[in-house]
Amino acid sequence: MSDKPAEYTGPERVFSGVQPSGSLHLGNYLGALKKFVDLQDDHDCVYCIVDLHAVTVWQEPKELANQTRHIAAAFLAAGVDPAKAIIYPQSRVRAHTELAWYFNCVARIGWLNRMTQFKDKAGKNSEKMSVGLYDYPVLQAADILTFKATHVPVGEDQKQHLELSRDIAAKFNNDFDAPGFFPLPEPLIKGPGARVMSLKDGSNKMSKSDPSDLSRINLTDDADLIAKKIRKAKSDAGVIPEAVEELEGRPEVSNLVGIYAALSGKSDADVLTEFAGQGFGAFKPALAELCVEKIAPITQLMNRYLSDPEEIDRILARGADAASEIADPIVGDVRDIMGFWKV
Ligand code: AQP
């Protein structure tokens, strides 16, 4: 019998990432950023701007560094505090790509073939997509496990990728007789805002890459634009129902109620009690007002941070050093476990 512990017994750590692939929207804020802030006081947190993931689709080289600063500004404006959490760009920490290669040799092609996000993003053009887009979930597993992160706050759309990270961790531990070396990371998905849907189609998630800007509320939108987008959001001819069960079959209404609930910190049921029987002519202005109240201070702060890019760069460089200090020894241990030559 092995004397190694069968399960991971190391410290807990939180890791998550956001791509610098466009302006952040309300879904990114509620599904990720807001959770990042809630966790930073009593957890060891690492928050990464995943620029290596962003380049799985074309990114304009002249824009990429600024997009990274933009996401850093959004983190800071949303309340992520670099004194409490590590914030850094993924491309500055080499451990991500090195571990991703080792994991490429652990993960099975059949596992990746089942990933629905690749199918959604590639559509009928999968043959023309980059190999990186296909391999994205393996890099994501490396992102998480290069810190031995135990908890990953993400939106609902990332659930399947997190399951793959767990499978890769378990197979690595098993194949290399290293029980408990990697933790099996737990997704932190539950809670309001885990799945914010498009304002134009309640069956699609709100997304940066949706061609219609009216489908999302960007963290950079001003009050007038937010009000316009909510006014034009798809709803239906009915009124706000009394009970949560009555939202069934009304995806757009359910989404608007969910957004109100997530932003106000109330439950869906409480929002329904407040607005039951009212039409969208009354509900939408209330929702627009709440959105502006919550988003405008973040936008203002983001602009303030963006006016001092050198300060953002200092924060990111310090974060990258701190991240490497944790990640490099873990990847060094992986090399030893796999038996690579060393002097
Ligand atoms: N609609 C959403 N509701 C809740 N959470 C969401 N997230 C994304 N969309 C929603 C969460 O935001 C975090 C960062 O996401 P990302 O930028 O790394 O990539 P993504 O999930 O691919 O976001 P987008 O907007 O859909 O980008 P594109 O269009 O480029 O693919 C993640 O935790 C994600 O779950």
Image: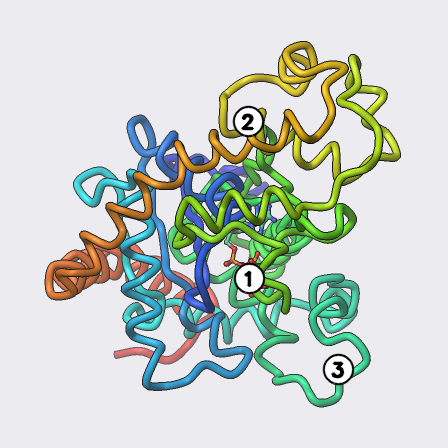
Mark 1, other Cα within 10 Å: few <14 / some 14–19 / many ≥20: some
| Residue named by callout 1 | 208
Indicate the amino acid at tag 1. Answer: Lys
Ligand 1 closer than 8 Å to the CB at disc 1? yes
Mark 3 or mark 1: which is in front?
Answer: 1
Mark 3, other Cα within 10 Å: few <14 / some 14–19 / many ≥20: some
| Residue named by callout 2 | 286
Is residue 280 positioned above or below 204 on the image?
above
Spot the residue most to the bottom.
Answer: 128
Upstream in sequence: badge 1 or badge 2: 1
Upstream in sequence: badge 3 or badge 2: 3
The location of residue 152, given as percent across then percent down, is: 49, 43
CA distance separating discs 3 and 2? 43 Å
Q: Nearer the viewer, residue 283 or 257?
A: 283
At horizontal 70% and vertical 89% (from top left) the residue drawn is 128
Indicate the amino acid at tag 2. Answer: Ala
CA distance separating discs 3 and 1? 20 Å
Q: Nearer the viewer, residue 85 or 209?
A: 209
* Left or right of 246 on screen, residue 254: left
Which quarter of the picture shows residue 93? bottom left
CA distance separating discs 1 and 2? 25 Å
Indicate the amino acid at tag 3. Answer: Ser
At horizontal 55% and vertical 48% (from top left) the residue drawn is 228
| Residue named by callout 3 | 126
Spot the residue most to the front.
Answer: 281
Mark 3 and 1 residues: CB-CB less than 8 Å, in contact?
no
Q: Nearer the viewer, residue 152 or 281?
A: 281
Upstream in sequence: badge 3 or badge 1: 3
